[in-house]
Every structure is written in structure tokens, then in C-alpha cells.
Image (cartoon, rainbow, N blue to C red):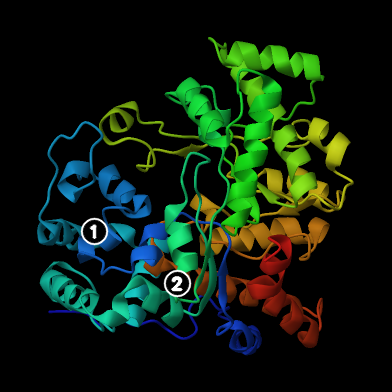
Amino acid sequence: MTHPLRLHPDRLFPSDGRTRDIARALHAGVKDLPIVSPHGHTDPAWFARNEAFSDPASLLIVPDHYVFRMLYSQGVPLDALGVPTVDGSITETDPRKIWRIFAENYHLFRGTPSRMWLDWVFAEAFGIDVRLEPATADLYYDTIDAALKTPEFRPRALFDRFGIELIATTESPLDPLEHHAAIRGSDWNGRVVTAYRPDPVVDPETPGFAANVRRFGETANEDVGSYAGYLAAHRFHRARFRDAGATSTDHGHLSAATADLTPAEAEALYARVMAQPTAAESELFHAQMLTEMAAMSVEDGMVMQLHPAVSRSHNASVLARFGRDKGGDIPLPGEFVRALKPLLDRFGNDPRLTLILFTLDEDTYSRELAPLAGHYPALKLGPPWWFHDSPEGMRRFRERATETAGFYNTVGFNDDTRAFLSIPARHDVARRMDCAFLAKLVAEHRLEEDEAHEVARALAYDLVKQAYRL
């Protein structure tokens, strides 16, 4: 016996009838607005080559750590899911077998945002009307596999079908950006831009850091033996990224710590970092580089994004066999008030800088982030990120941040995903949750309905374009 798959039109709306009616009206005004995805990790090669996705498992399971981390937590080995290894050891290669394991364990996703996103993809993208379970595994696989062989499911066609106005990918300064060049040189008018993620050349604890920095300097034709040459290489690559459409930089530091060293102190620290730095010296170098990146953003207008306070690749055995970004990243406590002060003392009042702050520590929303963004012109609050990219996470964010920072010191929504087909599903959840929050304010006579319509549009579309200078 199979069960129907239904996406209820009132999902995520308030249960109270009057408030639900307001949410419906607000959502009707924003649900079809174009999608702007200013930060994420989709592969630009998809859009450059516009080749068919190979199979359902490779598209929806193997690259998505939101999916396989849940399965792994319940004892499903990553190699059984086809996740590639760094040592070349064998993993499952039969996509149908991988899909059947997924279907057998789909109940594990009940109540999670991943379930909402996946059900949207199954119902809206592929037109499937029965629930995924062991009995329907092959039906799902065959339906999706057949669709992926058609022109309508090529990356560019899906980009247009989903109403995407822009996607920003994220690349290292060592990336040649050839896929972005191919997109710009094609006859397709989809807008795919890059973002400057300098972590491999600013994190001394990155494997191969010194070699990365040497290559970084060589491609910029700069002598990175000196700190001045190293900073000049950053300016070269930032300009190269801007030529590829970038309007933002992205920084995944362990903490939000910043520093403002004298030139002599910075030069001495750089020399130690290029040799054998201590953990404290590495952290200080991170901190100094955030301030240096802010200075460069004041010069060139690129928006900064800071994603701190996460212990990346916490599971050492998974890291050793499967590499980074395999679901083993765990939130840490965050601190921003003292950490950001050196940077803010220099640039916090400068309207030429936009620094968008993200956190995985929700305790900082009302205590630190909203008060900071509600004061400093340079600061904006990024949306609930990663583990809090969820209905409840979005509700808590609005409840804790709005009273102090308002709506207009936030930047709308970004999906931060590698899972291309989940992008419209994620934006749908965000728009519904924002409309539900606004409807409550209207029902409680804290906001007029015409104002709520304006805010709903701003949160869905306008603020992200303003914040990221798109």
C-alpha cells in the first residue's frame, strides 16, 4: 500500500484562521518573485557545460551532507551511499542501490527541513504524487531518471524554470574561474557569479597552506615573501573575481575575532605564519586578515560575509577517509561584541563597508548581533544558517532580532546549498515563514497590513539585492 504525497497549500501558515488568511494574502504577493541566491555552493560547471545530471542518487544524495549525515547518524555507512573517498577506496557505484537505501530510511527525515525540501522537489519538480518509501523506491528512481534525460531537466532549463534571477557560487582564490568565463561567453542569459572565499590562503592550519600561498602569489605575479606582496596578491585576485561578476567575499573563520596590528607587527606575524606558527599565531593572523579584508572591501566595494563558530570536520575518521564537508561540522558558542571591536573601530561607521554576520549560536541573536546591527552602519544580519535554516530557526530569528535590529538591517534569505533542486524549496519555506511572522504582527495590531506587504517583498527580494549590491 502506498501513501499520497501532498504539499498542503497552507503549510507553515498559522493555525488560527484569521492570521492564516493574512499570511495567505501576504504570500500571494511574494511567492512568484524571482529567486536571488547570493551565497551558495552549486557547481558553476553545471551551468557552463549544461550537461544532463547523471542519475537520481548522484543528484540528490551523494553530494548533499544534509541528507547523508542523517543516514550516517543511524548507522548507514557513507561508502554504502556512494560518497567518494579521498584515498580512492571503493564505495558503492550502483545508483539504484543507493536510492533504495535512501528510500528504506526516508522515515528518518520526518519533522526535518530536509523532508520539506525533498518532498517539494519530488512533487513540484518531478510531479510525483506518492510518498517515498521502500515500495515506491523504484518508481521514484525510474521517474526521476527518465526526467533527467530530457532537455527540460538540464541545469540551465531548471534555472529558468525555477525563476532564478541570480546564483552566486563560492570559489577559492586559486580557482581559475574558467566555468564562469564559459558562462559569460555563452548565449545563455542566466546570471551566475562567483564569490571570493580566501580561506585556503588565510588559514595557516589548512593542509598545504604555504604551497597555496606561493601559488597564490605566482598567479598574481606578486612576491608573497613579504606581507605587502601577499596583500597585493589579494587585491589582484579580488579584481579577477570582480571581473567574473563577484560582489561579495566569504570568510569561514573559527571565530569572529578581529585585530588591527601595526604594519611592523603584521609583517612579523606573517613571517611566523609562513614558517611554523603556533595555534595562537594562526588565530591572530585570521583576526588580522578579517580587518585587512574589510579595508579592501572599503576600497573595492565587495560585500563581506562572515560565517564563524563552527567546528568543521569534527569526526576525524570521516575526515581522513572522505575529506571535508561530509556532515561532521558542529556548532560552537559565538562571541561578537569584543571580537569585532578592532574591525568596527576602524570601519564600523563607514557606509562603504557592508559586513554580513551569520551565526550558529542563536543565543547571540538578541544579546549581541541585533544590538550591533541595530547600531553600526556597516553591519547587517545574515539569515538563519545551516542547522537553523528551518521553519523554527527562521521563526526564532525573527522573534529575537526584529525588536532591536528591525527588518531592514537584515538581508533577506540565502540558501547556502550545494543541492541545486532544493533552492526553490528553501526559498518557499523562508517566504512562508516570513509571511507567517508578519501575519501575526498584523493580527496583533502591531503592523498595518499594507506595511506587511511591503516588508514581505523586501524580505523575499529587495533586501538581498541591496545588501549584496546586485
Q: Looking at the picture, tell me which residue is in the foreground, 150 or 63.
A: 150
Q: Amino acid at mark 2?
A: Ala
Closer to the observer: label 1 or label 2? 1
Question: Who's the residue at 21% across and 60% down the image?
Answer: 57
- How crowded is the residue under tag 2: few (<14 C-alpha within 10 Å), some, or many (20+)? many
Q: Position of residue 203 (x, y in %)?
A: 55, 27
The image shows residue 179 at horizontal and vertical percentages of: 42, 57
What amino acid does circle 1 point to? Ser
Disc 1 marks which residue?
58
Q: How many marks can you see? A: 2
Residue nearer the viewer, 120 or 20: 120
Q: Camera-side residue: 320 or 151? A: 151
Q: Is residue 367 visible?
A: no
Tell me the tag on residue 396: none
Residue 332 pos. (x, y %)? 55, 35
Quadrant housing residue 285: top right
Q: Is residue 117 left or right of residue 354?
A: left
Q: Secondary structure at mark 1?
A: helix
Q: Is residue 380 above or below residue 281?
A: below
User: What residue is drawn where x is 79% and y is 14%?
Assistant: 264
* Foreground residue among 239 and 356: 239
Residue displayed at 26% across by 84% down: 129
Residue 395, above or below 213:
below
Q: Give the spatial CA distance, label 1 vs label 2.
A: 19 Å
Question: Callout 2: helix, strand or loop?
Answer: helix
- Closer to the chain start, of discs 1 and 2, is 1
Query: Is residue 137 visible in the rendered structure shown here?
Result: yes
Relative horizontal placement of residue 284, taking residue 199 as reference (left or right): right
**Disc 2 target residue:** 425
